[in-house]
Amino acid sequence: MALSEEFLTDDLHPIDMVENLAEHYDWQFDRVGDDQIAMAVEGQWRTYSVTLAWSAHDETLRLICTFEMEPPGEKLPALYEALNEINDRCWAGAFTYWGEQKLMVYRYGLLLHGGQIASAEQIDGMISSAVLAAERYYPAFQLVVWGDRSPRDAMQVAIAEAYGRA
């Protein structure tokens, strides 16, 4: 059964759909308000904080996926270079580093202008894409910040495909 088959009404609020998805996947979540929900999504490398917020004013469903990161100050130029390289490969969203909060952030906005309604599959895809991007590039961030690797070398780890079996 498709995820959207659970939602038979056309006027379901996008955050209600996110809440239903969180329950479906058994993610911990907190309905922060009518227009916002925060969840914890377990990945291979760590647990990611995923927040979705609906803005009726500009008809946008915003997603941020964060994880803590505290690079030493001298590593920030290399981290910013890695962010540029990584963002060149991200088509649906982008990473940024929020230094004051010590958070690596993946952001994406789904525009639903003209009264469009997001499907459960679209929202599920947004969340999955964000977590997959964080999982894919997490090792590159770590290698740049803690492994003394150049951003270009670290990117080779992130974009390498595994073949065969271990």
Image: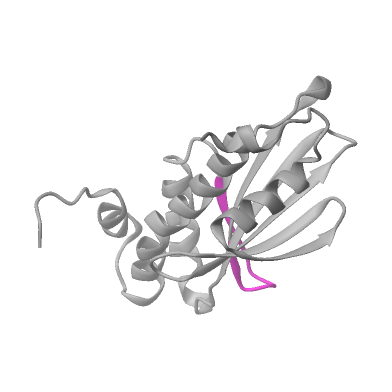
Along the viewing direction, whichever of 82 and 26 lies nearer the viewer = 26
Is residue 112 in the magenta section? no
- Could you say where residue 90 lies in the image, as x and y percent from the top left? 47, 41
Q: Does residue 31 appear left or right of residue 154 in this picture? A: right
- Could you say where residue 23 lies in the image, as x and y percent from the top left? 63, 58
Q: Which residues are magenta?
A: 94-104
Is residue 99 in the magenta section? yes
- Could you say where residue 162 lies in the image, as x and y percent from the top left? 18, 51
* Location of residue 82 with respect to 92 vertically, above or below: below
Q: Residue at x 51, y 35 (%)?
A: 1
Q: Residue at x 90, y 36 (%)?
A: 57
* Location of residue 62 with respect to 41 vertically, above or below: above
Q: Does residue 149 appear left or right of residue 103 in this picture? A: left
Residue 44: image quadrant is bottom left
- Tell me the quarter of the image containing the C terminus: bottom left
Which residue extends farthest right?
Answer: 57
Q: Residue at x 73, y 41 (%)?
A: 61
Q: Does residue 140 appear left or right of residue 37 in this picture? A: left
* Location of residue 71 with respect to 31 vertically, above or below: below
Along the viewing direction, whichever of 155 and 139 lies nearer the viewer = 139
Colouring style: one colour
Residue 29: image quadrant is bottom right
Q: Which secondary structure is most common in the magenta stretch?
A: strand
Q: Residue at x 42, y 56 (%)?
A: 82
Q: Does residue 75 appear left or right of residue 100 in this picture? A: left
Along the viewing direction, whichever of 151 and 156 lies nearer the viewer = 156
- Could you say where residue 72 lies in the image, as x and y percent from the top left? 50, 79
